[in-house]
Amino acid sequence: MRLAFILGEIGSGLRRNLSMVISVVLVTFVSLTFVGAAGMLQMQINQMKGYWYDKVQVAIFLCNDSSTATGCASGAVTKEQQDNLAKMLDSPAVKQYISDYQFESQAEAFKHFKEQFSNSPIVDSVTQDQLPASFRINMKNPEKYQIISETFSSQAGVETVSDQRQVLERIFEWMNGASVAAMVVAGIMIFCAVLLITTTIRLSAFSRRRETGIMRLVGASKTVIQLPFILEGVIAAVVGAVLASGTLWLVAQFWLNGDLSKQFLNTPFISSAQVLVIAPVLIALGGGLAGISSLLTLRRYLKV
Amino acid sequence: MIRFENVTKVYDPNARPALDAVNLEIDRGEFTFLVGASGSGKSTFLRLILKEDRATSGSVYVAGQNVANISSWRVPKLRRGIGVVFQDFRLLPQKNVFANVAFAMQVIGKSRSIIRETVPEVLKTVGLEGKERRMPHELSGGEQQRVAIARAVVNRPGILLADEPTGNLDPITSMGIMGVLDKINQNGTTVVMATHDDDIVNEMRKRVVELRNGVVVRDEARALYTSMIPVVGESRRMKDASDAEIDRAQGVQQ
């Protein structure tokens, strides 16, 4: 009986305040979409990290005829220098950090270069001896790059030690920046949503002050008086959260795994199923915020 | 049933108290008129019983319980034992007569079958049988007040507080309302009625408590609206002071 009564009260409250309720739905929808987008970007970063970090290598580029680095003062790398470097890579001090390495000769480097830039006219202007030979190292732990760099960059015959991770890191930094920006927008929008929910609940309480006044007088409990108002806010916010989750799912399903994955074949995109992990978080966040802000509003504007 | 022990209520520390050291006891089943000019403290008296306000000093006991000791989450329970009727009826305009009375039972969680059984009974008590489906705007003032009374007593409270229930009604309709209140009182409910209506008080011949500037200046059984006892001593001094104040106020108005 009491449940039916509370549900009826909620229904009439939502109907009376329809335009305000719709605006609450839309504002929470937009703000939570931004929160979810930030979350998706973070998931995407993690996914790409996991995928790429297994593949990235540290390269020790050796001097060639045209090298200008200080370690290359004596010209192109000699056979002894190269053997010496290979010996160092096999020594236990270095070996504990690397899982394996390959030597890439100038001829192989030239072949890879031609494959990589097969569509570009630059291939015609590059000759084999302009490219450096290199040791390609797979690290056990990519974080330990610094040790390899310190050990080898000052060795004779080494032009430079480069970490492919650093290139990726720059992309990730950019994506991180984007997700932070999304969070900032989300924060502002959530603030708007909270203010709007507060105003809506205040209006709702004001338009039903006759009912609540009588409820108070005949001894209705605080729960019966306040719950319909709180649930009104929560329901509107949860509807917004569901819409936001749906939108993010559509983005993942049809944009990331549709258009984008066709354009970037070797980039691992997050699946639409992974987005569903974000949905409960958004719903809890929307409902929680609405509940708390309604409760605080009622404490001020609805005396019991 | 209701006991005031040296109760003082101060709203504004710079003005005189709304109630000043009031001592009063109203027994179970009694019918009491609370009379006095506007601002004499009648409404404050009723508000303190409902714990709408807190006494500045002294204690208010309702049904043997000091209301100051009732925690805020148990205040609803206190109010379930008290029915209230106002001058302006306070019905819900979009609900019909039945729904208005049923509302008071719904919000405290009574079952639908009990509501369907009780509401017609109460409507019969207040003389509104057959008007369950009417909307408030289709009723006369007297009928609307009967609905309000029905709503106030439908949960069988031990106390009924009426704050000028006949203030908006003509004398004949008012007598009808008094008949309803009397009937409820006969059924064992303690009734406290604040009023200005001298005809009614004189007709009913019940206990009369007169407040003047927050002080009880008269408490008489089976009394009239105006005192039959000459005012003497301290009360006399206060009466003169308040008369002077009333004269001044009227002078300002003119």
Image (tube, rainbow, N blue to C red):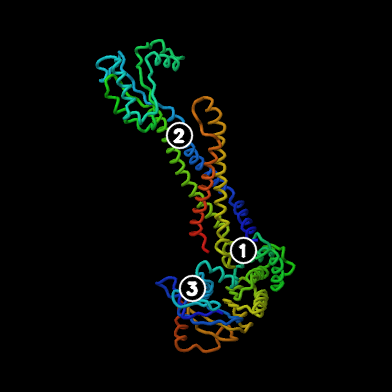
The amino acid on which the numbered mark 3 sits, given as a three-letter code, is Asn
Q: Residue visible at 56% across and 68% down? A: B76
Residue A19, visible in the rendered structure: yes
Mark 2 Cα shell of 10 Å, populated few (<14), some (14-19), many (≥20): many
The answer to whether marks 2 and 3 mark residues whose Cβ atoms lie closer than 8 Å is no
Q: Which of the two discs, 1 and 3, labels the residue nearer the N terminus? A: 3
State the CA–CA distance, disc 1 to disc 3: 25 Å
Does A6 appear above or below A81?
below
Q: Residue A100 location, x and y as percent?
A: 39, 26
The residue that label 2 is drawn on is A45
Relative to B19, residue B100 above or below: above
Say above or below: B14 vs A150: below
> Dot 3, how many residues are within 10 Å of its Cα: few (below 14), some (14-19), or many (20+)?
few
Which residue appears at 44% of the width and 27% of the height?
A55
Q: Residue at x 53, y 41 (%)?
A: A277
Chain to which mark 3 belongs? B
